[in-house]
Image (cartoon, rainbow, N blue to C red):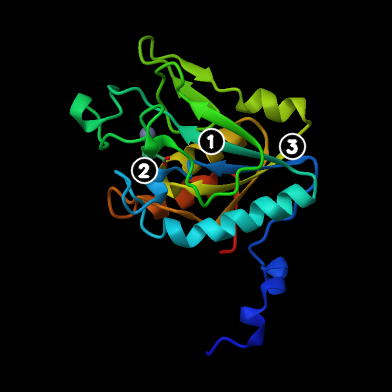
Amino acid sequence: MAPGPLATDPFVRRYDPAMAEYDPATALIVVDVQNDFADPAGSLAVARAGRILPRINDQVAVARAAGAVVVYTQDWHPESTPHFAKDGGIWPVHCVADTWGAELHPDLVVDGEVIRKGSNGEDGYSGFTMRDAVTGAMIPTPLESLLRERDVSRVVICGLATDYCVNATALDARRLGFETQVLMNAVAAVNLQPGDAERALTAMADAGAELVGT
Ligand code: VGL
Ligand code: ZN
């Protein structure tokens, strides 16, 4: 079907069925929209990341206007970590602290708090928890306390990547008792193994997260 006039009207976006509803008890969590994932020149570039960026910015604007909390996470690694293939892990080197690849993408509207996962060399995918590289213990990031301080009971999640950090953040949000929505038109997957994205969607839905826009 050819796009009708509605499709080109910028105000129609407001009625996008995949647009979440926001209020002050809701937090929009924008996961890892960083150069290494979101820029085609990034070391772990996610296909379609460029397509979801404007949708994420739309969500940020609507969330802000409704008085919701907006937070951004950043994958933040030391130069050597068991996360990287060169050190025994599975990933190319990416999001090394204080490098271009770790910076939030320049096209992302940043209007809220930024949480760096692993500022002290910890690893992990979730915005809520990370693993101490030495002891292996799971330790919290500041995200949960930030949300509790602001009386947030519901989180809306978008960003990168569906099958890793979005998935881990959504599962932790459910475990911590937050009502959780994941925006299907504002996430994209790495798909290191075929089927990773589908498995992540099933895991999130099984944990009680609502997949908005499916
Ligand atoms: C991520 C792979 C490695 C993510 C982070 O942000 O989803 N994926 N590190
Ligand atoms: Zn990483």
Specify whether 18 is left or right of 198.
right
Mark positioned earlier in the residue sequence (3 or 2): 2
Q: Amino acid at mark 3?
A: Ser
Q: Where's residue 30, x and y in %? A: 57, 44
Q: Where's residue 43, x and y in %? A: 29, 43
Res. 22 mark: none
Specify whether 37 is left or right of 154.
left
Res. 73 mark: 1
Res. 153 mark: 3
Give how far apart the Cα atoms at labels 3 and 2 are. Answer: 31 Å
Residue found 79% across the figure and 31% down from its top: 151
Quadrant housing residue 170:
top right
Secondary structure under badge 2? helix
For residue 104, above or below residue 14? above
Picture quarter with the C terminus: bottom right
Q: Amino acid at mark 2?
A: Asp
Q: Can the viewer see residue 108?
A: yes
The residue carrying mark 2 is: 36
Q: Say few, some or many: other residues with alpha carbon within 10 Å of mark 3 (under 14 / 14 to 19 / 20 or more).
A: some
Q: Nearer the viewer, mark 3 or mark 2?
A: 2
Q: Amino acid at mark 1?
A: Thr
Secondary structure under badge 3? loop
Q: Say few, some or many: other residues with alpha carbon within 10 Å of mark 1 (under 14 / 14 to 19 / 20 or more).
A: many
Residue found 30% across the figure and 23% down from its top: 79
Q: Nearer the viewer, mark 1 or mark 2?
A: 2
Give how far apart the Cα atoms at labels 3 and 1 are. Answer: 18 Å
Q: Nearer the viewer, mark 3 or mark 1?
A: 1
Q: Where's residue 42, x and y in %? A: 33, 46
